Amino acid sequence: MKRFASALTASSSHFHLLRHSPMAGCGHVPGIVLVSKRHLNLHEYQSKALMQDHKINIQKFRVANSVQEAEQIAKEFKVREYVIKAQILAGGRGKGTFSNGFKGGVQLTQDPAQVAPLVSKMLNSRLVTKQTPPEGVLVQRVMVAEALDLVRETYLAILMDRDSGGPVVVASSQGGVDIEEVAETNPEAIVRLPLDINKGLGLEQARMLAEKLQFSVNLREEVAQQLIRLYDMFLRRDCVQLEINPFGETPDGRVVCFDAKLNFDDSAAYRQKDIFSQEDLSESDPAEVAAQRVGVNYVSMGAASGGNIGCMVNGAGLAMATMDIVQLHGGKPANFLDVGGMVNQKSVEAVFRIIGSDAQVKSIFVNIFAGIVDCATVAKGILGAFDTAFPDPNNPLPLVVRLLGNNAAAASDMLRESGRPIHAVEGFDEAAALAVKFARGG
């Protein structure tokens, strides 16, 4: 029998700078590719509440924002054993250390009198794990949940799959471990079931999956109903990933969804306002949050990368090529930044403020290949940014601009005639080399 203290967790599907991305959060299962790139993060208690709303079996839980609330929870919430978990978005909490010296962001106790003292050691202290910044993350909430034993662990995921043109269920009777390991050592243990999005997951299909997951005959109907509810939530909530690991069985014959990862289609934010409004941005990079607000994809390479060339590009493919050519010339990009096809003057100015806020940046490389975008719009945004974006307007960062496509000639002339220290260059290789030279102080 295995003790499973972990409660529900949710992860974001971050924008990865990879040309070929595996299935985010679920490992690489051949033929499955996720399409989400949303930076949405939900705390485990938020994901838990969402699943509870859809009548999915989960561990019972409460949330404490103060020691007084924890004391009240201990009085009213009676279970055989409690698992107490600090609510931050980083992993590795169980082995983390708090700034007050207390060790372990996940604690177990059978004594209700210990709930509040344990919560008090977590709240308003910074938890440091392998996935947090060195200074840790401030804990503002603690989840108190029911700890359950497990006798069986299975794996279940519902994903949007490009190859199938719709949702697909990936299931395995071997849960509780990385699905990559199962795929490598025992691929026949993985069941892959593409679904017709117009028909959904039918009862017979759900019963078949329950059998494949090797649940006992007396539990298969309950398992099938849970699978149907999970698919209903996946569809109604515009998920692109719903992963349950483990989808388990308790000693008393309960079927429970324990650890889960949920990702949502960012294009459906207008439809799922209650979910997207819950996103906690307090732990996010302020520059990435600012970029998200103006609708551009920005990822900082971080101080450890040594990147000192700020990049502004339209199109993810061109952005990656720009980073490659910068490195080819011996430079280091400070960020990935794709302004997309709907860029306007204000968003260009906002992008320059974001790049200019990075103290490591020593030069900026703008690389625009315009189709829908009007290069003149980009040029106006660049000129407008000189007065608002740089820490010292009288000493702006060296700027190399390459504009090609829609209205490029007029836009380049506008920049050259502005009197600003802007270097308008047509050649990709020449522009990258110049940006690297400026970053080195040339």
Image: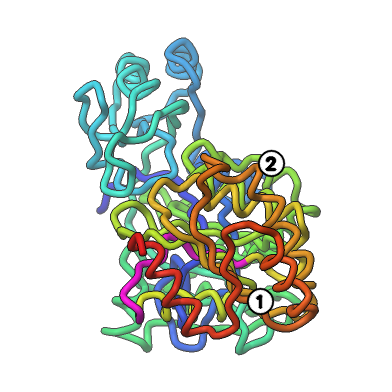
Number of numbered discs = 2
Q: Which residue sits furthest top?
A: 68
Label 2 element class: loop
What residue is at 77 percent from the left and 60 percent from the top?
Answer: 344
Provide the residue designation for mark 1.
403
Inspect the image, locate mark 2, and give the three-letter code of the amino acid beneath it: Ser
Answer yes or no: is residue 58 visible.
no
Inspect the image, locate mark 1, and give the three-letter code of the amino acid beneath it: Leu
| Image quadrant in which you'd find residue 208 | bottom right
Residue 408 locus on image (x, y percent): 74, 78
Q: Which residues are magenta?
A: 328-338
Asked whether, in this view, residue 31 is left or right of residue 229, the answer is left
1 and 2 marks in contact (CB < 8 Å): no
Q: Which mark is residue 331?
A: none
Asked whether, in this view, residue 87 is left or right of residue 125, the answer is right
Residue 138 locus on image (x, y percent): 40, 29
What residue is at 42 percent from the left and 73 percent from the top?
Answer: 214
Provide the residue designation for mark 2.
277
Q: Is residue 337 magenta?
A: yes
Asked whether, in this view, residue 242 is left or right of residue 229, the answer is left
Residue 66 locus on image (x, y percent): 47, 16
Q: Is residue 391 magenta?
A: no
Per the model, the C-alpha gap separating discs 1 and 2 is 37 Å
Answer yes or no: is residue 249 visible.
yes
